Amino acid sequence: MTTTWILNGLTIDPETGDTVKKHLKLENGLVAQWLDGSAEPDVGSAEAIDAAGKLVSPGLIDMHVHLREPGFEHKETIASGTASAAKGGFTTIACMPNTRPVIDTPDTVKLVLERAEAACGVRVLPYAAITKNELGRELTDFESLKSAGAIGFTDDGVGVQNAQMMKNAMALAKSLDMPIIAHCEDDSLVVGAAVSEGAFAKRHGLKGIPNESEAIHVGRDILLSEATGVHYHVCHVSTEQSIRLIKLGKSVGVNVTAEVCPHHLLLSDEDIPDSMDANWKMNPPLRTPRDVEACIKALEEGTIDIIVTDHAPHSEEEKAKGMERAPFGIVGFETAFPLLYTKFVKTGRWTLGFLLSRMTSDPARVFGLDTGKLEVGAPADITLIDLDGEREVDPASFLTKGRNTPFTGWKLSGWPTLTIVAGKTVWSEEQGILKSSEE
Ligand SMILES: [Zn+2]
């Protein structure tokens, strides 16, 4: 029997929303017991972690990440990506299939799971592609991909352009009780642009990506989800128009859920520096301040269900190609919680409990995971967070291979200090990554 105590940590009282001191006992990878802070637990020879002054949170869950392996190991590997996730406080991550080869065969699903198993211990849930090679021409073998361990289907990185193809995918996914996760983008409206249609594009004489390119797919797919009954999950929502459609879909009982990224809650196209720094280039692009406010409100009222990072590392050479030629994407694991905690909780707009639920229990609910809550008997996936200490974002300190972030130099608090998966510490501020394979 392996027993660990987490002593004197702070948890949120569900009644008052205040933080209260408690002791937590973990046994054999599960949450075993909570004791009041005034009690004196009999720790004996068990491992004891001093969490005084730290928040004891359920491990964070990120349902949209790019680990880049196989095929793009110069950007990230499963080892470096899971290490970065652990440092960001994430204990479960779901990785996108736009690797090379694309995750579109059972063998590739198994390869990702095996490499994740050999990495630091963060749980990795692979998505498989909807269409072979994400080319939109032929469906993959959903049944065998599910058997191999895929948790859902998505062609993330590109939209499925053909409506009949999407409808067939949804019908098949529904028959297997699996979700369809969609990157919503109509290629005929995108016109090869790098930024959103708006102030920045105008100022620099650039073509812009219009909001409709996202929302048209959202509307189409909500109708197809209604027709097929599938659980349809919208990736990285960024526009007011998409939100209107999701709200309508939910109001008539369509099984639609949605996610939003920290950068779409914090930055608009008006914030992009005139230096044309490609660390501000991502897909969907940064939209107008009006879209940003719509995303925040939609998350607050539950039209958007969860927060994801869309962690998308690229090499410095790739990002140095400039706004028009650099690839889309920014890294996300190691800044997500501190950004949102500092900008929304410390400012008083959100409660701590609200932010945590959108990054733990809500993603678990949407995707049917048994993690995301620290009830007795639940998996002991835990993140300790320092809510007070303030530090600047410094890409040189990242464990991800990517340095591509627009948040360099931001002064933030809410930094994770220790990450536990299934009762075992996988990362701590003092010791870094601890190999879980030493047993
Ligand atoms: Zn995407």
Image: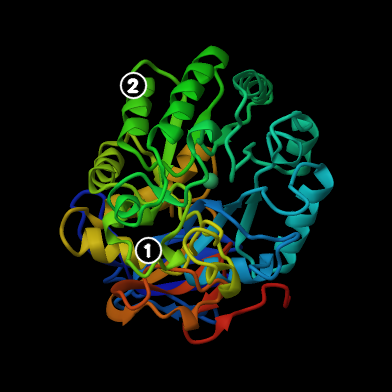
Please determine whether, in this image, residue 248 is positioned above or below residue 294: above
The residue carrying mark 1 is 337
Residue 266: x, y in percent?
29, 57
**Residue type at numbered disc 2:** Leu
Residue shown at 47% from the left, 55% from the top: 282
Residue 417's place in the image compared with 22, above or below, is below
Q: Position of residue 77 (x, y in %)?
A: 68, 67
- Is residue 268 in view from this perspective? no
Q: Residue at x 49, y 66 (%)?
A: 322
Q: Which residue appears farthest toward the bottom when viewing the image?
A: 430
Q: Residue furthest right?
A: 107
Estimate the spatial distance between the alpha carbons at disc 1 and disc 2, rounded to whole Å: 30 Å
Nearer the observer, 280 or 348: 280
Q: Which residue is found at the position 24% from the left and 48% from the top?
A: 289
Location of the C terminus by quadrant is: bottom right
Characterize the local packing of mark 2: few (<14), some (14-19) or many (20 or more) Cα atoms within 10 angstroms.
some
**From where the camera sits, is residue 24 visible?**
yes
Residue 435: image x %, image y %?
67, 77
Q: Can you give x and y, in whole percent of width and height, for residue 368 in the image?
A: 54, 38
Q: Are marks 1 and 2 in contact (CB under 8 Å)?
A: no
Q: Which residue is mark 2?
A: 248
